[in-house]
Image (spheres, rainbow, N blue to C red):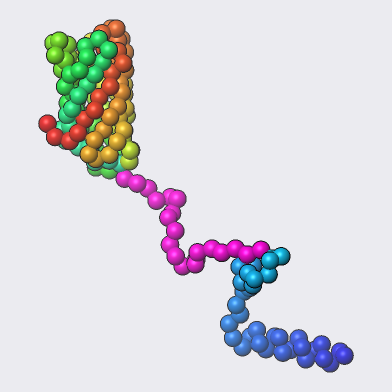
């Protein structure tokens, strides 16, 4: 009996050392057995999306124009001139906004901010005692957003929205 166990151990050891060993997984089970479960997974060699893959910020550099709307003045023209840094993550010095309404109201000035893969956020200055902050979302073909006027101009410009596309 002892000799049989020893031979069995030696036979298994020689089989293991002689060739490749294939691991057995639950998904290798026979699915015809209704009392046993089964599962599957894609082959490990198939590339899956990497959660750390970074999507580049939008390329919004240049002139964008469209419509601006606010409660008191109605509809007008919106123009943004965007300059971006080399990695496109920032709206930098040289960037501006210019809003013109048909009732002769206007607001314009410099802006700075950040850019993501889905839009941008910005802060700016429309003159003494009037700052703005806002954001836009979309893609490289169209952006829509909102902005808030802060300071003395906040009573004039309220609930401001814009919709812009590339080109002026």
- Left or right relative to 84: residue 25: right
- Expressed as whole percent of the image width and height from the top left, the position of residue 70 reads 26, 15
At 24% from the left and 32% from the top, the residue drawn is 92
Residue 10's image quarter? bottom right
Q: Is residue 155 visible?
A: yes
Residue 54 included in the magenta stretch of the image:
yes
Identity of the residue drawn at 22% across and 39% down: 141
Residue at (61% x, 80% y) in the render: 21
The location of residue 12, given as percent across then percent down, is 71, 86
Q: Position of residue 53 (x, y in %)?
A: 39, 51
Q: In the visual, does 33 lie left or right of 22?
A: right
| 82 is higher (above) or lower (below) than 31 | above
The quarter of the image holding the N terminus is bottom right
Instruction: Work out whether residue 14 or residue 104 is closer to the camera in this orientation and state it.
Output: 104
Give how far across and how far down residue 31 sits, in percent: 63, 69
The C terminus: image quadrant: top left
Q: Residue at x 27, y 43 (%)?
A: 87
Question: Is 148 one of the magenta-colored residues?
Answer: no
Observer-nearest residue: 156 or 92?
A: 156
Q: Residue pushed farthest right? A: 1
- Residue 67 shown left or right of residue 114 in the figure: left
Asked where in the image residue 57 lies, by quadrant, the reply is top left
Q: Main secondary structure of the magenta part?
A: loop
Viewer-nearest residue: 135 or 145: 145
Q: Is residue 57 above or below residue 163?
A: below
The part of the chain drawn in magenta is 37-56
Residue 122 falls in image quadrant: top left
Q: Is residue 99 above or below residue 112?
A: above
Residue 94 visible in the displayed image: no
């Amino acid at each position: 009996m002892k000799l049989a166990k020893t031979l069995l151990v030696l036979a298994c050891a020689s089989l293991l050392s002689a060739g490749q060993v294939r691991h057995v997984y639950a998904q290798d089970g026979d699915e015809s057995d209704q009392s046993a479960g089964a599962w599957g997974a894609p082959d490990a060699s198939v590339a899956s999306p990497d959660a750390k893959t970074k999507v580049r910020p939008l390329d919004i550099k240049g002139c964008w124009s469209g419509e601006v709307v606010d409660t008191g003045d109605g509809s007008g023209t919106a123009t943004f001139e965007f300059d971006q840094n080399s990695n496109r993550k920032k709206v930098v010095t040289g960037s501006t906004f210019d809003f013109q309404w048909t009732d002769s109201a206007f607001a314009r000035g410099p802006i700075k901010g950040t850019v993501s893969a889905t839009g941008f956020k910005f802060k700016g200055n429309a003159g003494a005692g009037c700052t703005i902050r806002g954001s836009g979302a979309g893609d490289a073909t169209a952006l829509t957003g909102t902005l808030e006027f802060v300071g003395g101009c906040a009573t004039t410009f309220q609930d401001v929205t814009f919709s812009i596309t590339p080109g002026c």
